[in-house]
Every structure is written in structure tokens, then in C-alpha cells.
Amino acid sequence: MQIVSVESLLNINETLIVQFISFLIFLFIINRVMFRPLRALIKKRDEHVDNVKKGILDAENAYKTLLDQIKAQESAVKTEAFAMRKKLEESGSEEAAAIIESSRQEIMNLKNRVGRELEDQITAAKAHVKKESEVLAVVIMEKVLDRRLQP
């Protein structure tokens, strides 16, 4: 049987120093190759994110400004539309009143003309009836008297 000697896990000798120097060289190289570019990339990304956030805030402010302008324009257009509507209603009412008045005037003129024509027809009818009644009266008197009357 053989006795195995157990050496300690950590021996301080020249290999430890070589490993330590190798580790420092590895850290220097990894820092140069990986960590510095990565930090620069992260810094650029953070700047880009900040610029995007600032752009978003600027866009939101511009949106709010435009929305306020649109609301003001909408209000002005509504006010103008109501004024135009009122003006059109007034002009329509005036035009309707003028049409009604001209219609009334035309009706009155037509009524007067028809009244004069009717009066003329009544006068002519009265004259005709008077003439016919005189002839008829003469005929009746001749029949009643049984003789001829001289006109």
C-alpha cells in the first residue's frame, strides 16, 4: 500500500505569478477589445434613447400646440358658420316677405281687375235684361190687351 500525499490546493510558486500576470494581460485585452467598445456602444445607445425621448416630448408639445390651433380654428369657423346661417335666414325671411307682399299685391290687382270685369258684365247683363224685359213687357201687354201696341 502506498501513502498518497495530499498537497495543498494553493501552492505559492512561480506558476501562480505567471497565472496572475496572464490574468492581468487577459483583463487588459478583454477591457480593450470588449468592455471599452461595449461601454461606448451603451453610451451611444443611452444618448440615442435620450434624443428619442426628447423628440417624443417635442412631438407631443407640437401635437398639443397644433390641437389647440385646430380647436381655435374650429371655434372660429363655427362662429362664422353660425353668423352666415343667421344672415342667410334673415335674407331668406326678407325675400319670403317680399315674395308674399308681391303675391298679395298681384292678388289685389287680379281681384280689382276681375271685379271691374264682373261689374262690366253685370252692367251689360242688366242692360240686356232691361232691353229683353221691355220687349217682354210689350208682348205681355199686347197679349193681355189683345191688341197691338206701337213702340
Image: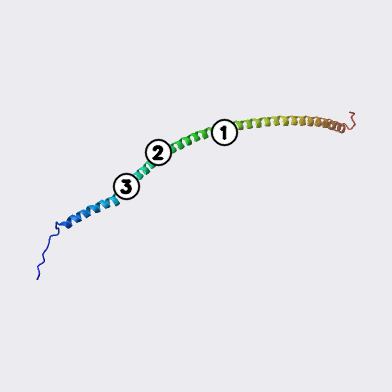
Cα–Cα span, label 2 and label 3: 31 Å
Q: Which residue is mark 1?
A: 88
| Residue lying farthest to the top in this orientation | 151
**Looking at the picture, which amino acid does disc 2 mark?**
Asn
User: How far across and down, in percent of the image, does residue 1 sit?
Assistant: 9, 71
Residue 50 in the image: above or below residue 18: above
Counting residues from the start of the chain, the first of labels 1 and 2 encountered is 2
Q: Nearer the viewer, mark 1 or mark 2?
A: 2
Q: Nearer the viewer, mark 1 or mark 3?
A: 3
Q: Which residue is drawn at the image coordinates 24% and 52% (left, top)?
A: 27
Q: Nearer the viewer, residue 46 or 99?
A: 46
Numbered disc total? 3
Counting residues from the start of the chain, the first of labels 1 and 3 encountered is 3
Question: How busy is the neighbourhood of tag 1: few (under 14 within 10 Å), some, or many (20 plus)?
Answer: few
Secondary element at image label 2: helix
Residue 3 in the image: above or below residue 97: below
Q: Which residue is mark 2?
A: 61
User: How far across and down, in percent of the image, does residue 45 sit?
Assistant: 34, 47
Residue 82 appears left or right of 36: right
Counting residues from the start of the chain, the first of labels 2 and 3 encountered is 3
**Looking at the picture, which amino acid does disc 3 mark?**
Ala
Q: Which residue is mark 3?
A: 40
Cα–Cα span, label 1 and label 2: 40 Å
Residue 63 appears left or right of 137: left
User: How far across and down, in percent of the image, does residue 151 sit?
Assistant: 89, 28
Q: Nearer the viewer, mark 2 or mark 3?
A: 3
Secondary element at image label 3: helix
